[in-house]
Image: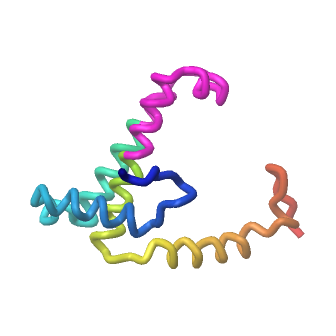
């Protein structure tokens, strides 16, 4: 029996390996250039955005509408898959990149200056 996969027990490397195997099994590696993957990623983000276009969708609506939640989930997964494909194509350590960028963000957006949706220049 396969273990239940969720955010609490699944590593980044699992996702990277799954996407890499999926791409390799289909002989798509030659097409997965950074440029192509960035364009595909942009298209998937646009498809996610399109779900919300001209609609007043609240958090409650998303939670209550199973079909809407499934559509949103599918598009988020597509974005994630293409992002991982890009990460794989340039051999980026995503955890390291995340950690470095979060430190930069903490410096750039200090709690004293940026809090509760407000900006207070010190």
Residue pictured at 38% horizontal, 36% vertical: 47
Which stretch appears magenta?
48-77
Q: Is residue 98 above or below residue 36?
A: below
Q: Is residue 81 above or below residue 34?
A: above
Q: Is residue 60 left or right of residue 23?
A: right
Q: Is residue 29 above or below residue 107?
A: above
Which residue is outermost to the left?
Answer: 27
Location of residue 121 in the rendering, given as x and y in whole percent from the top left corner: 85, 65
Residue pictured at 43% horizontal, 54% vertical: 3
**Quadrant the C terminus occupies:** bottom right
Q: Is residue 91 left or right of residue 112?
A: left
Q: Is residue 28 left or right of residue 45?
A: left
Residue situated in front as seen by the camera: 23 or 89: 23
* Labels in figure, total: 0
Location of residue 16 in the rendering, given as x and y in whole percent from the top left corner: 35, 65
Residue 54 shown in magenta: yes
Q: Is residue 82 above or below residue 52?
A: below
Location of residue 19 in the rendering, given as x and y in whole percent from the top left corner: 29, 59
Which residue is outermost to the front?
Answer: 1
Location of residue 50 in the rendering, given as x and y in whole percent from the top left corner: 43, 31
Residue situated in front as seen by the camera: 51 or 67: 67
From the image, give the main secondary structure of the stretch colored magenta: helix
Residue pictured at 31% horizontal, 66% vertical: 17
Residue situated in front as seen by the camera: 85 or 9: 9
Residue 105 shown in magenta: no
Residue pictured at 60% horizontal, 21% vertical: 64
């Amino acid at each position: 029996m396969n273990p239940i996969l969720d955010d609490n027990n699944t590593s980044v490397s699992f996702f990277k390996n799954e996407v890499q195997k999926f791409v390799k099994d289909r002989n798509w590696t030659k097409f997965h250039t950074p440029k192509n993957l960035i364009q595909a990623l942009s298209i998937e983000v646009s498809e996610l955005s399109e779900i919300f276009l001209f609609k007043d969708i609240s958090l409650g609506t998303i939670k209550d509408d199973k079909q809407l939640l499934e559509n949103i989930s599918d598009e988020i997964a597509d974005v994630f898959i293409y992002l991982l494909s890009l990460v794989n194509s340039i051999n980026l350590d995503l955890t390291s990149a995340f950690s470095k960028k979060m430190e930069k963000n903490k410096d750039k957006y200090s709690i004293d200056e940026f809090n509760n949706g407000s900006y207070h220049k010190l």
